Amino acid sequence: MGEKVTIGGIIYDVGNSTATKTGTWRVFKPVFDSDKCKRCGICAKFCPEGIIEITQEKGAQANMDYCKGCGICAEECPFDAIKMEVEKK
């Protein structure tokens, strides 16, 4: 219980998003197909959390500790390389 929760979830300390892992309440998760991925970076540009990394070896990968499962990356991918699946806990 070490974190102090503010009314309305307001964050007063700018730049502290890496201190709070937000991926634990995700309902859907993105699954990346490295064969379809063209490494264009569109998914990374549209990700509101900025947690998608593109590498030549693996293509697009999301840091699931911070992914909220919004699906914007899958919606914006022009190559259909990202599918949203139900998160299994």
Image: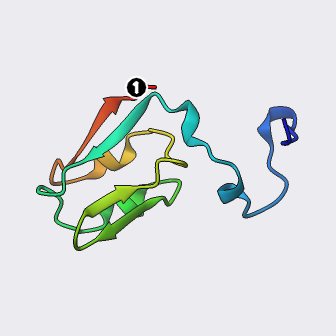
Indicate the position of residue 76 as horizontal and vertical percent values: 29, 50
Which amino acid type is shown beneath numbered disc 1? Lys
Report which quarter residue 4 is drawn in: top right
Residue drawn at x 12%, y 55% is 36
Report which quarter residue 37 is drawn in: bottom left
| Residue 47 located left or right of residue 42 | right
Q: Check the image and name the residue furthest to the bottom.
A: 56
Residue drawn at x 72%, y 64% is 15
Residue drawn at x 17%, y 47% is 80
Identify the image's colour scheme: rainbow, by chain, secondary structure or one colour.
rainbow
| Residue 47 located left or right of residue 54 | right
User: Which one is in front, 9 or 1?
Assistant: 1
Indicate the position of residue 89 as horizontal and vertical percent values: 46, 26
| Residue 39 located left or right of residue 20 | left
Q: Check the image and name the residue furthest to the left.
A: 35
Number of numbered discs visible in the structure rendering: 1
Q: Quadrant of the N terminus?
A: top right
Indicate the position of residue 69 as horizontal and vertical percent values: 44, 38
Above or below, 39 against 79 in this view is: below
Residue tagged 1? 88
Residue drawn at x 30%, y 60% is 60
Q: Secondary structure at mark 1?
A: loop
User: Which one is in front, 78 or 88?
Assistant: 88
Q: Residues within 10 Å of mark 1 (few under 14, many from 20)?
A: few
Indicate the position of residue 11 as horizontal and vertical percent values: 80, 49
